[in-house]
Image: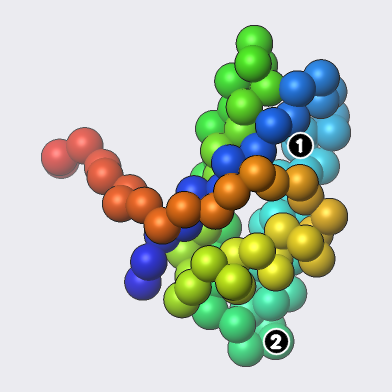
Amino acid sequence: MPVYLVDRDLNGITMEALGGAQRSAIETAASMREGGEDIQYLRSTFAPDSGRCMCLFEALDADTVASLNTTAGLPYERITEVLDLHAPG
């Protein structure tokens, strides 16, 4: 299944709010799966100095990922299909 990177600017967000945003993404993905959508939250990376946050989702298309973020109330700048490369072993 394709993987999508969601790029966010969360400059100034508190760690508490960042945790809440992650929970919202996870819970919204679970709710969408229960409703028949094929989507999975994978992980996020956050750079506190710049406020950049990058989240990875598995989904059939970018529109499904956009719908999750809109439903969850999470801001984003762009959604891009990416290759999620793992270290060998």
- Measured as percent of width and height from the top left, residue 14 is found at 83, 23
Residue 83 falls left or right of residue 62: left
| Contact flag, marks 1 and 2 (Cβ < 8 Å) | no
Residue 89 falls left or right of residue 74: left
Residue 27 showing in the rendered view: no
Residue 51 falls left or right of residue 86: right
Identify the residue position indicated by label 1 in the image: 19
Task: Give me the disc on residue 46.
Answer: none
- Secondary structure of the residue carrying tag 1 is helix
- How many residues crowd mark 2 within 10 Å: few (<14), some (14–19), many (20+)? few
- Quarter of the image where one finds residue 53: top right
Q: Nearer the viewer, residue 80 or 35?
A: 80
- Quarter of the image where one finds residue 67: bottom right
Identify the residue position indicated by label 2 in the image: 35
Question: Seen from this angle, which residue lies furthest left?
Answer: 88
Name above or below for residue 40 compared with residue 32.
above
Q: Nearer the viewer, residue 37 or 67?
A: 67
Question: Seen from this angle, which residue lies furthest bottom?
Answer: 36
Question: Seen from this angle, which residue lies furthest front?
Answer: 77
Name above or below for residue 17 compared with residue 1.
above
Residue type highlighted by circle 1 = Gly
**Scheme of image coloration:** rainbow
